[in-house]
Amino acid sequence: MGRTRKPAPRARPSGNTPRADLVLRRLVDEFKSGGITETISKVAILKDPNDNRPCMSWSLKNRVLMVGQGTFDARNVAQWNRVNRRVIARRSAIYIIKPLYAYSCAHCAKGAAREAHLRYARPSGLFECAACGLSVEPRAVRGGSDPAVLRRIRGFGCQPEFRVEDTVGDALPEYAPARPPPLHGVAAKWGIQVKYQVDPSGSSLGSYEARSNTIHLGTESPWVFFHEISHAADSMVLARSGRALKGGQDPIQEAVAQLSACVLSEMYGMGSTRAHTRDYIRAQARGSGERELVRLALDVLDRVEGVLGLILSTAQELGGATASGQEDGHCGDGARAGKIRDH
């Protein structure tokens, strides 16, 4: 007689709702792709303790999920209505996760009673223990304030929220960092608007729009600001010879901005980004032949010289008047540039 094969063990249910499993997969994918670091750097923009956005009270994992879905501000319908905004018709919600709890009677659980868990009884509107008859108000059970109730997480569910980009109504105060980056005065001098908001595509931490003369930042990192203001300076230098920035990720202009940002980071004491800059430029030059690489290097260095010259000369003109604040430890744009150029 052949051996009877044991049935395969049944997979234990996760305890999550199906939608929660999909949302949690987003977090797993962030870790697998290595994008979690970039996403958390975007989340760092939410650190202002005076901010009254409801998301400020969320856990890090929910803020990561929110930013990963393309927004810095998400609320439920009632919360948007309280600030005189309404959700646009047929706009879809984004989802964050919330724990689902199982409740047990603390007294019965000590004796390992099979009926230790509390059930909600609709007729009485109370949570009741079938073993000892304990009755507890729902508010005390869900709030975790009653010592007679044991609470454990049995899984996760989802909570719908709507992005600010999917609402209309009264204007909201724009986010501004407590400590502006060095050289922010240069951007103001050139009439550049600097806006802090998540890139809806989630593809970058920052961007420069030459048409509207606007820098969009999804992080408070000064390195990203240096990269984008270098694009702005490159655009101004090119305009002198009747040229303009190309749309999209052009290898030469991206290398110009990154190399310029690397130099500015070291000059302004923001730390070295040499390794990242090297890898970034290698990625931009990938697939190029020897001749193309030589041309790229020569063109990049000529343009970097023009970019740095324009930025630092503007900072020098501004002097100490546009300091990020001597009181908070920043040197002024021009004062810092002056010290650097005297060496």
Image (spheres, helix red, strand yellow):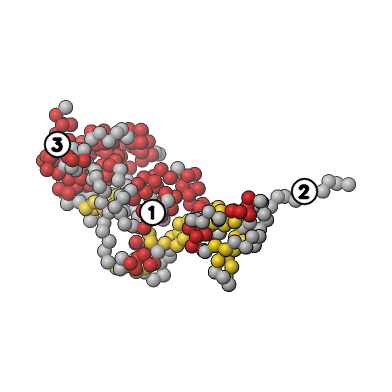
Q: Which amino acid type is shown beneath numbered disc 2?
A: Lys
Mark found first going from the N terminus, 2 or 1? 2
Q: Which amino acid type is shown beneath numbered disc 3?
A: Ala
Say which of marks 1 and 3 sits in front. Answer: 1
Mark found first going from the N terminus, 2 or 3? 2
Residue ID for mark 3: 335
Task: Kindly state the secondary structure of the residue where label 2 is placed.
Answer: loop
Identify the residue at image location x=77%, y=48%.
6
Q: Is residue 78 above or below residue 336?
A: below
Q: Does the image show residue 247?
A: no
Q: Quadrant of residue 151?
A: bottom right
Residue ID for mark 1: 57
Residue ID for mark 2: 6
Discs 2, 3 touching: Cβ within 8 Å: no
Q: Residues within 10 Å of mark 2 (few under 14, many from 20)?
A: few
Identify the residue at image location x=26%, y=56%.
174
Label 2 to label 3, Cα distance in Å? Answer: 78 Å
Residue 72 % position (x, y): 35, 55
Comparing 38 with 118, the one in front is 118
Q: Does the image show residue 188?
A: yes
Residue 232 % position (x, y): 22, 47
Q: Residues within 10 Å of mark 1 (few under 14, many from 20)?
A: few
Comparing 191 with 333, the one in front is 333
Q: Quadrant of residue 200?
A: bottom left
Residue 79 % position (x, y): 36, 64
Discs 2, 1 touching: Cβ within 8 Å: no
In the rendered structure, find residue 40 and report the number of the disc placed on it: none
Identify the residue at image location x=59%, y=56%.
104
Q: Is residue 103 left or right of residue 302?
A: right
Label 1 to label 3, Cα distance in Å? Answer: 39 Å
Residue projecting furthest to the right: 1
Task: Kindly state the secondary structure of the residue where label 1 is placed.
Answer: helix
